[in-house]
Amino acid sequence: MGKAAKLRKIRRLVLRWPVYLFLVAYTLFALFPVVLMWINALKDPLEYKIEFNPLAFPKKITLENLEKAWLVGHMGTYMRNSIIVAVPRVIGILILSSLAGYAFGKLRFPGMNTIFYLMLFGMMIPIQAMLIPLYYNLQRIGMINNFWAMIVPNFGIMMPFAVFFMRSFFRDLPAELMDSARIDGSNDFKAFVYIMLPLTTPALTTMMVLQFLWSWNDFLMPLMLIYEDKLRTLPLGIMFYLVGGYYLDQGLVSAAVTISSLPIICLYIVFQRSFVSGITAGAIKG
């Protein structure tokens, strides 16, 4: 019996080795551009002038490129603008999607399924098809070239997916929790705040990371709605930063992209466990 168990274990390992090798190779392939960007951001500017080799490790590690990108390239201003836009987006989407997901997942009201499917229809419309009418509508109400132009329309664009995502978590929570809350005298809102919402922490964390990532990397909407440099977000600022005269300086370009990637990396590291558990639970429930 011992030999049979050992043989089965060895057989499983042999069958899994190709999968492990593929995953390791894919990880290295995916990380290569990121590591290369960081390496070039830390190189001495003289290395680019003397003998430039983008694949070589820096002979001297320096923060000069990062400092110049932050001060000369206005990365500090662009990052502040991205935070001003991203934080209200994320908070608003979390509040609205959790409320709507709870209503569609646990409550019963007339026309519930019809309203939900009409909301899901918004996921089928590409954002590129919305931008031109959105621009003219915002222009009529004087909402062009300010932060609200990048915040408010995002609620309508992102809500269909967020509601669909949160509904799946609320729907699979035990119905007995709602019954117990009602027996104890709680209304639907109290049951949502004190019982249901804490149980969806993995889902909320996953939604927060995804929404922050999408907002941080949003390029098309700021490009259409913002034309003053002091209001540009990071993706738009980097584009003008590159076109504005530094596109030949690969050290500064790498430094600018490195600065823009750090908040996302830090956010994922902090919420990694909840994010992975939320994605896994959503995949199982979906």
Image: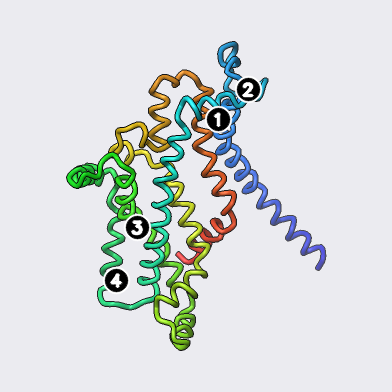
Secondary element type, mark 1 = helix
Q: Quadrant of residue 53?
A: top right
Q: Which is more N-terminal, label 1 or label 2?
A: 1
Residue beneath the point at 57% across and 41% down: 26
Left or right: residue 228 compared with residue 212 = left
Q: Position of residue 5 (x, y in %)?
A: 77, 64
Disc 4 or 1, which lies upstream in sequence? 1
Write down the residue under mark 4: 113
Q: Residue at x 44, y 70 (%)?
A: 170
Above-or-below relation of 250 to 273: above
Query: If you read the primary sequence from the N terminus, does the residue marked by circle 3 or circle 1 appear first?
Result: 1
Residue found at x 43% / y 77% = 190
Q: Which residue is mark 2?
A: 56
Q: Which residue is mark 1?
A: 37
Residue type pointed to by label 3: Met
Gap between marks 3 and 1 measured at Cα: 34 Å
Asked if marks 4 and 1 touch (Cβ < 8 Å), the reply is no
Residue most toward the right? 2
| Image location (x, y in percent) of residue 1 | 81, 68
Q: Are marks 4 and 2 in contact (CB under 8 Å)?
A: no
Crowding near the residue tagged with mark 3, few <14, some 14–19, many ≥20 C-alpha atoms within 10 Å = many
Considering the numbered disc 4 on the image, is that residue within a helix, a strand or a loop? helix
Viewer-side residue, 235 vs 39: 235
Among the two numbered marks 4 and 3 on one chain, the one whose residue lies closer to the N terminus: 4
Q: Secondary structure at mark 3?
A: helix
Q: Where is residue 244? Give x, y as percent.
A: 39, 22
